[in-house]
């Protein structure tokens, strides 16, 4: 299955007055590397989140950030510590009476004093938190997968066009390759006749034998057949249900090997031109495969 490793997903959830949002970003990576940032009260669930992500995604560098939905940095509720405020007021009244200060105590001064306000931490047990986080992560991952699959379909169309170009080049190689044997035979006869300068006649059987040896060295039929088979396998993997990035990467290496062998065997200008085009097409495919899960 063709699915891009680049994508973005986002989701929000709210239950019983608790609201959370999640963002998931992914880019290319050889393996599945997951970085997670959770609110402090939910950090115990980090490993469960990582395992769930790795069940859904097989490759990519994935960053997940979960925040409170309203965007606050602190967790819980800001509350006034009335006992502390009352103690401050009593202490200031004593200071005013003892030293004769006339200035009134204003609200601005009072609220600027330490510990007047405190954060009441939000508490979620692991079971309740996991129910909330799991649904949030599932939604954000689904959003990410939708984007990755859409990009994958675009990649598939482009890859199929390059595979078609490779097959067209192979047709040209197949039509040209048999002519190389006849040409080699004629060149061999001409060169041997020139060397002997007509002093002796060379048996036709000997020329045929030598030409057959040369034909074996020039024959790239097996490589062309294997390369065609690799192209068919490439398309099958690309359209299959399983992530195919690693297999396609290996297949590209095999395709390159066959092309290099065709080029080394052919020793022909027309085939060499096709080999250059083949290498260009495979290189484009190789670069695009790096972004496939």
Image: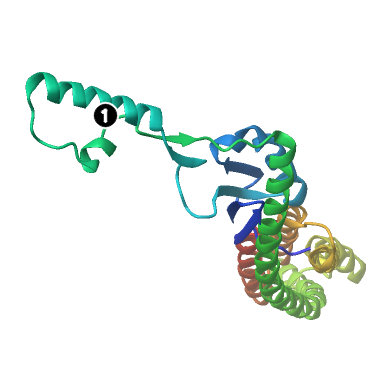
* Residue 80, placed above or below residue 66: above
Q: Residue at x 49, y 42 (%)?
A: 77
**Count of residue discs:** 1
Say which quadrant the N terminus sits in.
bottom right
Quick check: 99 left or right of 263?
Answer: left
- Of residues 109 and 48, the one nearer the viewer is 109
Q: Quadrant of residue 237?
A: bottom right
Q: Position of residue 265 (x, y in %)?
A: 73, 62
- Of residues 41 and 229, the one nearer the viewer is 41
Q: Position of residue 73 (x, y in %)?
A: 45, 45
Q: Which residue is labeled 1 in the image?
A: 89
Q: Position of residue 8 (x, y in %)?
A: 59, 61
Evaluate whether residue 184 shows in this view.
Answer: yes
* Residue 95, placed above or below residue 110: above
Evaluate whether residue 221 shows in this view.
Answer: no
Q: Position of residue 60 (x, y in %)?
A: 64, 50
Q: Quadrant of residue 164?
A: bottom right
Quick check: 236 left or right of 258?
Answer: right
Q: Residue at x 72, y 54 (%)?
A: 138
Quick check: 109 left or right of 235?
Answer: left
């Amino acid at each position: 299955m063709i699915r891009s490793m680049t994508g973005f997903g986002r989701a929000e959830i709210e239950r019983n007055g608790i609201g959370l949002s999640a963002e998931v970003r992914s880019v290319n990576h050889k393996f599945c590397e997951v970085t997670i940032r959770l609110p402090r009260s939910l950090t115990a669930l980090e490993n469960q989140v990582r395992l769930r992500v790795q069940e859904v995604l097989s490759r990519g560098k994935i960053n997940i950030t979960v925040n409170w939905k309203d965007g606050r940095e602190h967790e819980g509720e800001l509350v006034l510590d009335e006992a502390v405020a009352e103690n401050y007021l009593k202490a200031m009244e004593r200071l005013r009476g003892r030293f004769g200060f006339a200035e009134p105590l204003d609200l601005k001064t009072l609220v600027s004093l330490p510990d007047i306000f405190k954060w009441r931490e939000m508490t979620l047990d692991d079971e309740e938190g996991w129910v909330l986080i799991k649904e949030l992560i599932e939604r954000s991952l689904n959003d990410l997968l939708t984007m990755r699959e859409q990009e994958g379909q675009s990649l598939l169309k482009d890859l199929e066009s390059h595979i078609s170009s490779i097959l067209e080049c192979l047709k040209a190689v197949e039509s040209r390759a048999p002519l190389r044997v006849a040409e080699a035979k004629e060149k061999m006869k001409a060169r041997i006749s020139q060397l002997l300068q007509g002093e002796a006649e060379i048996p036709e059987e000997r020329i045929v034998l030598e030409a057959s040896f040369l034909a074996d060295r020039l024959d790239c039929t097996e490589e062309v057949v294997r390369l065609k088979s690799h192209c068919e396998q490439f398309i099958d993997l690309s359209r299959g249900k399983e992530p195919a990035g690693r297999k396609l990467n290996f297949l590209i290496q095999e395709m390159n090997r066959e092309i290099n062998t065709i080029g080394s065997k052919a020793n022909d200008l027309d085939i060499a031109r096709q080999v250059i085009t083949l290498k260009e097409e495979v290189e484009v495919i190789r670069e695009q495969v790096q972004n496939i899960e």
